[in-house]
Image (cartoon, rainbow, N blue to C red):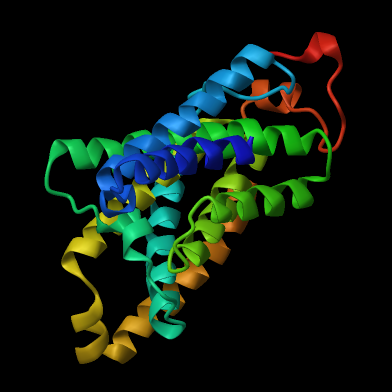
Amino acid sequence: MQIALFAGWIIPCAIVFLVSGINLLQFPEFLSWLYTLGGVSVIVCALVRKRDNFQFMPRLYMTGELFLLCVSMAIALVMVKDGLGNILPLPVWSDMSFTSIRIGSPYSIICTVMLMAMMEEILFRGIIMEALLHRYSSGVALVQSALLYMLAHPDPSQMPGAFMMGLVTGAFYLRFRDLCPAMLIHVAYNGASALLLNVGSHHFTQHSPVMYYVMVAGCTGALIAGYFLLQRISLPKSTAKAAPLPGKPLLHTERSV
């Protein structure tokens, strides 16, 4: 599935470049739609083949406590990612980075903040991670899905944040086996990242570096505390009954779409 996703993204770019000489990597907004269409194609393929059990639609389980935890962890994750970027600066491949898309139109907001977030959660948690959970332990499936999600973001500056995002959303998916919390975290994360990208944090790091890194450290602690709070949130009865044991393959009669 991961190979198919990359092929659906890279092959059209290569064909256009060979035929016309136009480098599509210079058009990140177009690439974001191409990436989204590639992910949707993989999802449709999984629907048609029905080889692995996966979660295509969220169960829409959400409480006020869970909503606040999802949003707060998403914001904390953005700050930690930004702090890591300042401490360990990585090269930015601007032509391959979707972060060059600013919030300036409903088109950009819908595409980068919402549609891509939901598509990626269906693909990486609902399909890839769900398949891994029926083959490996929960810890192995969590790390593997996070690594695959990181590799789907080839810009080196995005990789640490993508890996952490995969771990956080994967932990919520493991807890509830529902895409709704993961989607909420991802949408909130994209929105907060876009706002921080437009506002910028460089002036804050230059004028108040101590306060900035205190905030980053506090957000790191918030992520750790949020993980333990996650374990204390009660599960819906349907999740407790329906979720199979990690690493245990489903019987044919248990498979559902």
In x, y percent, where is residue 12? Answer: 42, 37
In what quadrant of the picture does the N terminus appear? top right
Look at the picture and state if 5 lies above or below 149: above
Look at the picture and state if 188 lies above or below 50: below
Query: Who's the residue at 31% across and 51% down the image?
Result: 23
**Residue nearest the observer in this picture, 177 or 25:** 25
Look at the picture and state if 247 lies above or below 90: above
In x, y percent, where is residue 169? Answer: 54, 47
Position of 236 compared to 210: left or right?
Answer: right
Query: Who's the residue at 26% across and 44% down the image?
Result: 29
Specify the quadrant of the image occupied by residue 84: bottom left
Specify the quadrant of the image occupied by residue 96: bottom left
Q: Residue furthest front?
A: 19
**Residue nearest the observer in this picture, 245 or 14:** 14
In what quadrant of the picture does the C terminus appear? top right
Q: Residue furthest left?
A: 104
Residue 238 seen in this snapshot: yes
Specify the quadrant of the image occupied by residue 118: top left
In x, y percent, where is residue 200? Answer: 21, 71
